[in-house]
Image (cartoon, rainbow, N blue to C red):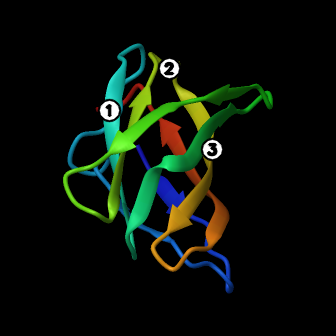
């Protein structure tokens, strides 16, 4: 699985790492992904949507991660293919950030 990060010049909370590298998402398995940002984020006021290649959007359940700069995202069982996390997070600086994280689920190990 590969992940690419889309960043914005005016972003306040930017994704810098996910747990997908250490624990790849496998087709057909529900899983949790921890997303690390470059600043503290507020889980209760943040939103993450999953968008598939057909444009279908699904709101994902998120919770606070293992530290102040992390969110845990619950992914449903997904088929192999390309997806986008569309996120809106509230950073410690009081600003919302909208951005996207693209990733692919592969049948190959």
Question: In the structure shown, which secondary structural element does the residue marked by tag 3 occupy?
Answer: strand
Along the polypeptide, which appears first: circle 2 or circle 3?
2
Residue named by callout 3: 84
Mark 2–mark 1 CB contact (< 8 Å): no
* Nearer to the camera, 45 or 26: 45
The CA distance from mark 1 to mark 3 is 15 Å
* Of the pair 96 and 82, the residue shown nearer to us: 96
Q: Residue 14: image x %, image y %? A: 51, 71
Q: Earlier in the sequence, mark 2 or mark 1?
A: 1
Which residue matches tag 2?
Answer: 78
Q: Which residue is mark 1?
A: 32
Q: Is residue 22 left or right of residue 86?
A: left
Q: Earlier in the sequence, mark 1 or mark 3?
A: 1
From the image, state whether disc 2 or disc 1 is nearer to you: 1
Name of the residue lying farthest toward the bottom: 9
The residue shown at (76%, 25%) is 56
Query: Could you tell me residue 8's position as x and y percent?
Result: 67, 77
Task: Left or right? Give the position of 8 relative to 47.
Answer: right
Q: Quadrant of the N terminus?
A: top left
Which of the pair 67/85 is nearer the observer?
67
Q: Residue furthest right?
A: 55
Say what secondary structure mark 2 lies in. Answer: loop
Could you say where residue 7 lies in the image, as x and y percent from the top left?
A: 61, 74
């Amino acid at each position: 699985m590969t992940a690419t990060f889309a960043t914005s010049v005016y972003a306040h909370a930017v994704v810098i790492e996910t747990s997908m590298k250490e624990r790849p998402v496998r087709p057909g398995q529900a899983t949790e992904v921890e997303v690390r940002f470059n600043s503290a984020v507020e889980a209760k006021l943040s939103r993450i949507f999953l968008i598939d290649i057909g444009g279908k959007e699904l709101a994902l359940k998120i919770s606070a991660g293992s530290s102040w700069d992390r969110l845990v995202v619950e992914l449903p069982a997904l088929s192999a293919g390309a997806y986008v996390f569309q996120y809106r997070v509230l950073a410690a600086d009081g600003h919302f950030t909208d951005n996207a994280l693209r990733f692919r689920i592969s049948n190959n190990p």
